[in-house]
Image: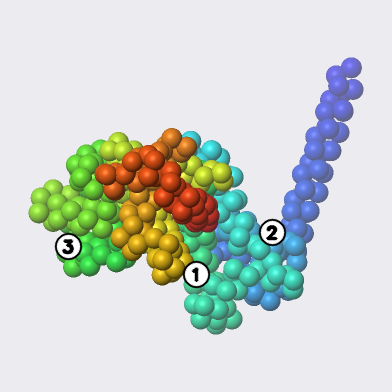
Amino acid sequence: MEEKSKKPYRMRKLTVNCCLLACCAFCKYFCQGFPTFTIGMNFQLRFPLRDLLRGATTGEYTEVQLRELHRLAYSLARHLVRRKIASGKLRLNLIGLSESDITHDCIAELFTRDENGVLVEIKKFFHDQQIFIEEMPDEALLIQFRRLTFTMVKDGVFRLYHEADPTLAKILRNLKAALGKSPTWSIADRFDEQYAEVISTPTHTNLPSIDDDELERFLCQIMAKTSDLSYVIHQLAEALLSERRYRTRVRLMSLAQAIKICYEIVGWMEVHETDDGLTLLFDDVRSTIREVRHYVETTMKSGYVDGGKVSKELFASYMDALEKILHHEFIDGMDGETSYFECLRYIRPSLSKDEYRTHHRTIFEYLVKLAKKETRVRLQAQ
C-alpha cells in the first residue's frame, strides 16, 4: 500500500518538473525572439526606441511596435500625473476621472494618425525641434520623447480643467495674457509646472512659497476695489518684493484658483449664462458691451443722425441708455426686468412717458433690440 501511494507522488513530481522545463524552454525561445532593450532608468522595450520613433514618423510600423510605443508614453505620462496628484496640483475630485483615465486622455492625441498611418504629433515635434532620429542614441531620444509626453500631459490637464471648470480655464487664459503684457512678470516652466515669476529679481529660494490662504487674503483686498488683472498682479509683485517673506514666484494654477475665489467673494464674477452654458467673466462681458455699443453707433449713426431723424446729441443719449440696459441685462441678470423708459430718463431727466412713447420709443427700442441680439451672438462665440 505504501509503494502504491508513493508512485503517484513521484509521477506528479515528474510531471511538474517537465512542465517547468517546458515553460523555461518557451520563455527562452520567447526572449530570443523578442529581445529587450534597456533605455534610461532601466525602462525596457522590446524594440530599439529609434526603430519605434522612425516607424511613428514614417507610418512603417507593426501593431506590436505601436503598442510598445504607447506603453512607453503611458508609463512616462502616468509618472507625471501621479506626481501632480501627490503634490495637490491635480485634483481628481474636480476633474471627475481616475488617474488611469487622465493618463490615457492626455496621451491620446500623440497617437492620432493621418491617412498614411503617420503619428502626426510625434512627427511634428521631431521636425519642429530639428531632431534627427537616426543620429541620436536611444537615451537622448528618450529625453526628447519624455519632453513631448510631458507637454501633452500639461496641455491635457489644462483641457480637462477647462471642461470641468470653464470659468477657471478662462481666468487662466486671461491671467497668462496679463502676465505676458506685464513688464514685471514672466512665465517660466519649473518642475513640470508653470510659474509666474517677478522679472530680474532673485526668487529667494531660501524663503517659503506664499500659501494659498495668504494669497487669497491678499488678492481679495485688492480685488475688492478693482477687477483689473493687470493692476492686481502689479500689486502682488510689489508686495512680494517689499515684504520679502515669500519667494517671488507663484504657481500659475494656484494664482488662477485664488483669483477665481476672490472674484466670487467680492462679487466680480458675472452670473449670466448663455444658451450654450458658457459662463463668462464680468470683464469679458463688459468689454463685449463696449464693443457692441461702438458697433451700433458706427453702423446706425449715418441713417439716423445724417438722415436728420434724430439730433447728434439725442443719438448719444440713446447710446448711453442702450449701454446701461445691456449692463442691467447681461451683467446684473435683470433680463426682461429693465425699464427702457427709466434708463433713457436717467440720461435725460426731463423726459416724460408721453414724450417717450410719442417721439423716442420706436427708434430707441429698435436700437436696443439690435444691440441685445449682437451681444448674445458675441458672447456665445467666446
Q: Quadrant of residue 313?
A: bottom left
Residue for point 84% across, 38% down: 15
**Neighbour class for label 1 at 10 Å: few (<14), some, many (≥20)?**
some
| Side of 113 relative to 182 (left or right) | right
Can see residue 247? no
Front residue of 339/124: it is 339
- Upstream in sequence: badge 3 or badge 2: 2
Residue 82's place in the image compared with 124, above or below, is above
Q: Residue 161 at x, y = what percent?
A: 48, 47
Find out whether the residues at labels 1 and 3 contact each other: C-beta distance under 8 Å.
no
Tell me the crowding category of disc 3: few under 14, some 14 to 19, or many 20 or more residues within 10 angstroms, Cα based.
few
Q: Which residue is mark 2?
A: 67
The residue at the far left in this view is 242
Q: Secondary structure at mark 3?
A: loop
* Residue picked out by circle 3: 202
Q: Nearer the viewer, mark 3 or mark 2?
A: 3
Q: CA distance from mark 3 to mark 2?
A: 46 Å
Q: Which residue is mark 1?
A: 144
- Counting residues from the start of the chain, the first of labels 1 and 2 encountered is 2
Q: Earlier in the sequence, mark 1 or mark 3?
A: 1
Label 2 amino acid? Arg
Disc marking residue 107: none
Q: CA distance from mark 1 to mark 2?
A: 19 Å
Q: Residue at x 28, y 54 (%)?
A: 229
**Residue 237 picture location, percent across and down:** 19, 56
Q: Residues within 10 Å of mark 2 (few under 14, many from 20)?
A: few
Q: Position of residue 148 (x, y in %)?
A: 51, 65
Rendering quarter of residue 297: bottom left
Which secondary structure lies at badge 1? Answer: helix
